[in-house]
Amino acid sequence: MRAAIARAQEILALPGRPDLAPIEAELRGYAEALLPVAEAGTAKLWRGSLKWWQRRSRLDIVHRTLAQPPPTDPLAAHAHLFHLTADCRVLLNQLAGEEW
């Protein structure tokens, strides 16, 4: 997953309009696989605490990102991949036990 995040960041830095669909699909798969783990970890926190609220809010953002179909417009696809990359980084950090 870290390699996919790094590839996405390289692709996002390229000039022009590279094809983003393959890396978007890969990152989407990782996010969908890790989201239940992140949800379970957040559910163990005291509901209403600042940490719970911060994680719950971030997970809601991930849900909204995943609910959107891949955009067809090149600029929107670029922005979508940027957000999906950030979401994957957050989920991976939680899995590794790091703070968000």
Image: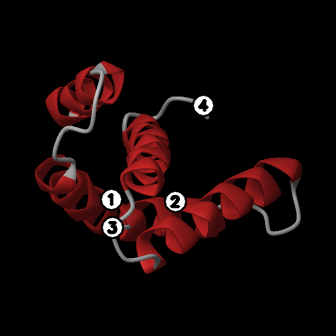
Mark 3 to mark 4: distance in Å?
34 Å
- The residue wearing badge 2 is 41
Horizontal and vertical percent position of residue 56: 69, 63
Q: Residue at x 11, y 53 (%)?
A: 22
Mark 1 to mark 4: distance in Å?
18 Å
Q: Residue at x 65, y 55 (%)?
A: 58
Residue 99's label in the rendered image is 4
Where's the C terminus, which quadrant?
top right
Mark 4 to mark 2: distance in Å?
12 Å
Q: Earlier in the sequence, mark 2 or mark 1?
A: 1
- Taking depth in this image into account, of 77 and 94 the one nearest to the observer is 77
Q: Earlier in the sequence, mark 3 or mark 2?
A: 2
Mark 2 to mark 1: distance in Å?
15 Å
Local packing at callout 4 (Cα closer than 10 Å; few below 14, some 14-19, many 20+) is: few
Local packing at callout 3 (Cα closer than 10 Å; few below 14, some 14-19, many 20+) is: few
Q: Are discs 1 and 4 less than 8 Å apart at CB?
A: no
Please, what secondary structure does the residue beneath circle 3 have? loop
Local packing at callout 1 (Cα closer than 10 Å; few below 14, some 14-19, many 20+) is: many
Q: Nearer the viewer, mark 4 or mark 2?
A: 4
Report the side of 41 relative to 11 (left or right). right
Please, what secondary structure does the residue beneath circle 2 have? helix
Amino acid type shown at disc 2: Gly
- The residue wearing badge 3 is 72
Q: Are discs 4 and 2 less than 8 Å apart at CB?
A: no
Q: Earlier in the sequence, mark 1 or mark 4?
A: 1
Q: Earlier in the sequence, mark 1 or mark 3?
A: 1
- Taking depth in this image into account, of 36 and 75 the one nearest to the observer is 75
Q: Nearer the viewer, mark 3 or mark 2?
A: 3
